[in-house]
Amino acid sequence: MMDPSRRQITKIARNASHFVQSLTRQLGLGASEYELLHCIRKNPGIRPDTICQKLYMNKSAAAHLCTALERKGLVRREVDPEDTRRRLFYATEAADSLKDDRAALEAFYYRNLMSGIDEEKLKVFLEVLDTVYTRSKTARLEDNRTLCETLEREKPFEEQTV
């Protein structure tokens, strides 16, 4: 089955990410570190094993990235009050500032892409985009269960020949 969007949303997001990463590389923060930092920001007090589950990462890689982020002052590690053998990770104010800087760069990028587009077309596009985003967010919050069930039922990959 052909994707009518031709994966253009993915490609635009990848281009935006490349733009932002190229400008923030001077901060010494790689894409994997930023992804992990985003996870910690969204889940304050997250345990390392939960980071691994959410990011499909092995313990060694997660530990290495957490230590690097801690050295850069973007996360802090605290003892879990329920189990002193465990550690919990929290984002620092510097991480929040970095997120704001990246969001501003992304906004600049998208604003420039959309400049000059007819106002009515842009309004309709943004309404559709909001609907697609809301559906995406809902799917993610349910761990994509419904999508996985549909994928299992429809088996779209069996239709393709290599």
Image (spheres, grey):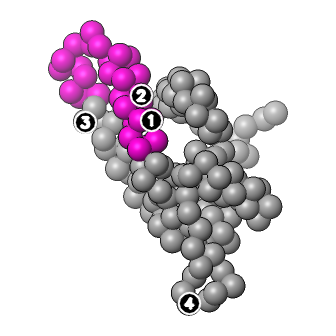
Residue at screen point 56% across, 52% down: 73
Q: Nearer the viewer, mark 3 or mark 4?
A: 4
Judging from the image, what secondary structure is the residue with disc 3 in? helix
In the image, is residue 79 above or below residue 109?
A: below
Q: Locate residue 22, reporting x and y percent.
A: 58, 24
Local packing at callout 3 (Cα closer than 10 Å; few below 14, some 14-19, many 20+) is few
Judging from the image, what secondary structure is the residue with disc 1 in? helix
Q: Locate residue 37, reporting x and y percent.
A: 56, 52
What's the magenta bit mostly, secondary-structure-wise? Answer: helix
Task: Check residue 127 in the rendering and tell me which mark sits there, or answer none.
Answer: 3
- 34 or 3, which lies in front? 34
The tag earlier along the polypeptide, 3 or 2, is: 2
Structural distance between the alpha carbons of marks 3 and 2: 22 Å
Query: What residue is pinned by disc 4?
Result: 82
Q: Amino acid at mark 4?
A: Glu
Q: Quadrant of the N terminus?
A: top right
Structural distance between the alpha carbons of marks 3 and 4: 45 Å
Q: Quadrant of the C terminus?
A: top right
